[in-house]
Amino acid sequence: MELPGPKAREVLERDGRTTSPSLPRAYPFVPARGAGSVIEDVDGNVFLDLNAGIAVTSTGHCHPTVVEAIQRQAAELIHYSASDFYLPIYSELAERLAEVAPMAGGVRSFLTNSGTEAVEAGIKLARWSTGRQYVIAFYGAFHGRSYGSVSLTASKAKYRAGFGPLLPGVLHAHYGDGRDMAVPPRGDEEGFPTIDHIEGLLMERIVAPEEVAAIVVEPVLGEGGYIVPPEGWLRALRDLCDRHGILLIADEVQSGMGRTGKMWAIEHAGVEPDILLSGKGIASGMPLGAMIAKETVMTWTAGTHGSTYGGNPLACAAAIATLDVIRDEELLENAAKVGDVLRNGLRDVQSRHDVIREVRGLGLMIGIELPDHDTAAAVERSTFERGLLMLGCGDASIRMSPALGFREDQARVALELFEEVVAETVER
Ligand SMILES: Cc1ncc(COP(=O)(O)O)c(C=O)c1O
């Protein structure tokens, strides 16, 4: 197929003249309509979508239950500010989120329009409720682009460059097995060198632990490369927080809402966060985020935080429908099962093409490590040209994050096309 096609080229030309040049477009894909995991561009080219709008359309494109819920709500009430009045659907969604939250005891929710706003709300609540000002985040992490969240973000310097000064009181530590450290720790040590580094170095030389409000962690690194931390690491992080009265904030904007085969990725580790941040897949594509906190933590008083649009009725209706579909269509089970099919299939591909350095992930959150950035970019572009939508992540990886209802037969088609791309693009 000719890509970009004539209609797509018209859009690209107008876009090039009129939109912010900061938008980080990956390749010239110009979507027009979608259903499930199939999406068509403006020229009628059809693609298998392993991006799901970047881990957003959790129930697939335009799931009928979600569409119907949005249409029904739109005909009743499109907006009334939930910060100032009592929207029934706002607390209905908060109740549904409480049912699936990975914390024992009561929780409360603050709804936002995006992931980054959920992160901002989490930082503010942590500082407010502890009376402490420092926040620790991780190298490789992506938490968004508004000032608080970009101060936590440390996946690529370009997200931060030119925007300083950023939020004071933010420190960074090494994630998981420390694979990004200049000299990675040896694998045979007891415990986790990256945890020792926080307690033995950061907290000895830079900040006293009683000044740290929160540690913010992605239970699986998203934009930073779809990296799963070693078993026991999140538990060790939780224990460290408990030793010093620090809140553990799980940023599940990308890893949550069933993507890893459990509702929240942190559940794989059997760890409870104090605050959980959700976004992306929460409303199948409607703009919504949530900051969910233990009620013992969410004690801030009226007027301390709010939002005109956060928890907009259309987005709430889509989120409730999304939760219904995940439950009724057993999408967690599907994500785990089809995720295994994809990962096993990719490991077979790896056994035939050693350009694939690693296949990793949980459920339908899958990262494929290639030798370098240029190879990852070439594979990303070639998959697009073959009708498969994938996106780079980390320094030299490419990710698969299809809708939770991705089918086994679709997975097999994706694997076949991906192997063709690897064989032709990389090994020519
Ligand atoms: C883990 C994580 N947190 C926060 C964000 C920011 O979300 P948004 O782009 O909706 O502001 C993202 C977006 O990619 C993310 O992956």
Image (tube, rainbow, N blue to C red):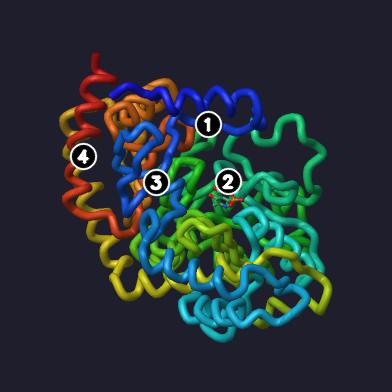
CA distance for labels 2 and 3: 29 Å
Q: Earlier in the sequence, mark 1 or mark 4?
A: 1
Q: Where is residue 334 in the image (x, y as percent from the top left)?
A: 26, 63
The answer to whether the beta carbon of the residue marked 3 is less than 8 Å from any atom of ligand 1 is no
Relative to 380, residue 261 above or below? below
Instruction: Name the residue tied to disc 1.
Output: 25
Q: Which amino acid does label 4 sit on?
A: Leu
Instruction: Name the residue tied to disc 3.
Output: 33
Of badges 4 and 2, the one in the foreground is 4
CA distance for labels 1 and 2: 17 Å
Instruction: Name the residue tied to disc 4.
Output: 415
The answer to whether the beta carbon of the residue marked 4 is less than 8 Å from any atom of ligand 1 is no
Instruction: Name the residue tied to disc 2.
Output: 142
Q: Which of marks 3 and 4 is nearer the N terminus?
A: 3
Assess whether mark 2 and mark 1 are in contact (beta carbons under 8 angstroms). Answer: no
The answer to whether the beta carbon of the residue marked 2 is less than 8 Å from any atom of ligand 1 is yes
CA distance for labels 3 and 1: 19 Å
Q: Earlier in the sequence, mark 4 or mark 2?
A: 2
Picture quarter with the C terminus:
top left
Q: Which amino acid does label 1 sit on?
A: Arg
Element under label 3?
strand
Relative to 91, residue 218 above or below? above
Q: Position of residue 424 (x, y in %)?
A: 23, 20
Q: What residue type is labelled 3?
A: Arg
For this rendering, which residue is in front, 175 or 400? 400
Q: Within the image, what quadrant is residue 412 found in?
A: top left
Relative to 196, residue 157 above or below? above
Q: Is residue 243 left or right of residue 220?
A: right
Q: Which residue is drawn at 36% across and 48% down?
A: 34
Q: Residue at x 65, y 82 (%)?
A: 295
Task: Determine crowd level at label 4: few under 14, some 14-19, many 20+ residues with C-alpha closer than 10 A.
Answer: many
Assess whether mark 1 and mark 3 are in contact (beta carbons under 8 angstroms). Answer: no
